[in-house]
Amino acid sequence: MQRYNGTYAKVNLINIKENVEKIISKYNKYKYYFGVVKADSYGHFDNKVISAVVKGGVNYLCVSSLKEALKIREKFKNIPILCLGVIEPKYLDVCVKNDITITVVSEEYLDSILNGKNRNFDSRINLNKLKIHIKLDSGMNRLGIKDEVEFKNVYNKILNSNLLLEGIFTHICSSSDEYYTKKQFEKFENMVKLIDLSKVKIIHLANSETLVNYEKIKFVNGCRLGIIMYGFTKEKSLNLKSTFSVYSKVVQIKNIKKGESIGYDSLYTAKEDEKIAIVQIGYADGIIRKNTGRYVYIYDKKYAIIGNICMDMLMIKVDDSVKLYDEVIILKDVEHIESVAKYIGTIPYEIMCNITKRVERVYEGESLI
C-alpha cells in the first residue's frame, strides 16, 4: 500500500518473536503459554503479528470477542483460541464449529447455556465439543465468579452436562501491589481447593507483570503473555526489544512572529520569533489532544508539540535544521511510549491501541516469520 501522506506505524515481527522466545525460556515451568492478541494485538494489527507470537512459542491465543476469534481462525486453523469476554448463548454453534473456547463468568450465564433460553442453536452441533474456561473473580471485581457456593454449583453443573470443562483462571488487577496480589492468590487457591483439580486440564493465573514478579503457584500450568510480548516489562534482565513505532512527515515550515497564536483556540502564543513545522498526523490517527506539550523526534533531536492538536495535523516548535518532508518520529520505542503515557496520564496499552486503522502498519521481518 502506498503511504500517500507519509504517516505509518512500524511493527517489528522479529522482535516480537524473539521477545516471546526470551520470556518462555526464562519462565519455562509452564505448559500453556497464552498469547493475548486482543484489540488487534494491542494496536499492532494483522495476522503477521500472530504468526510471530506463535513461532515464538505461544500455544494458545486469547481474544476479547467472538468477532476477533473468528478473524484469527480464518488463518490459524489449529491453535486453540480462548475468548476472554462473554459470548451470547445464541452464538455457541459458531463457537463449536470454529473451535472457540468460551469463558463462563457466572452461574446465571451457564444456566442460560444449559436451559436453551436465548439460544438459537443448531441441533446438529454437539455441545460436548464446546470448551469452557471458568473465570474466578479473586479481587478485581470485574468479570468472574467470586462466591464459593456459586463456583461449586457452576463446576458441578458443567461436569454433569455434556460441556467440556478445560480450564479455570483469574485475573490479577495490580501486580505492583504485593499485598493485594497475594490476597488474590490466596482467594484463588482457596476457591480451587473446593473442586477436584485433576478434572481440569489448564489452570492459568499470571498475566505479564505477575509472571515476572511472583513465583509460580505449584498447581498452575498456564500463564498469559500480554504487553510483555511487545517489550513492556519492569524485568529489564529479559532484554526485550521494542516492537512498535509511529512516523509522519513535515509538510510545511513557517516563521511565526512574537505574539502570534497557533492553531485552534489560540492555545499557544509565540513569546518570541519562532519557527514551527506542521506534521501530517492528528487525533483522528490516535494522537489525542492531551499530547500537546510532549516531544517528538527529528534526527534524534527532541521537539515539542505546541498548540491544540488537530484532527489530521499537529504543530511542533523547531529550529533551522528541520527541513520540508523530514521524517518525524511520533512514537519511538518502549521508553518513549512509556514517557508519553506518563505525560498524558494513561498507560502504554492505550497509547498503542489509540493508533487508528488509517495509520498503515509496515511490517519488518515479514519474510523471516
Image: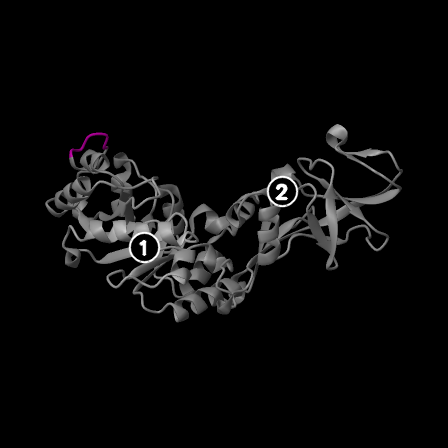
Cα distance in 3D space between marks 1 and 2: 34 Å
Label 2 belongs to which residue?
A: 287
Looking at the image, residue 361 sits to the left or right of residue 54; the answer is right
Amino acid carrying label 2: it is Ile
Per the image, label 2 sits on a secondary structure element best described as: loop
Label total for image? 2
Q: Which numbered circle lies on residue 300?
A: none
For the question of whether residue 168 can be seen, the reply is no
At 62% from the left and 38% from the top, the residue drawn is: 284
Magenta segment, which residues? 115-119
Amino acid carrying label 1: it is Leu
Query: Residue 25: x, y in percent?
Result: 40, 71
The residue nearer to you, when weighing 219 against 315, is: 219
Label 1 belongs to which residue?
A: 205
The residue nearer to you, when weighing 176 against 15, is: 176
Mark closer to the chain start, 1 or 2: 1
116 falls in the magenta region: yes
Type of secondary structure dominating the magenta stretch: loop
Circle 1: is it few (<14), some (14-19), or many (20+) Cα within 10 Å?
many
Location of residue 113 (image quadrant): top left
Query: Residue 195: x, y in percent?
Result: 15, 51
Which residue is most to the front? 179
Query: Residue 121: x, y in percent?
Result: 22, 36
98 falls in the magenta region: no
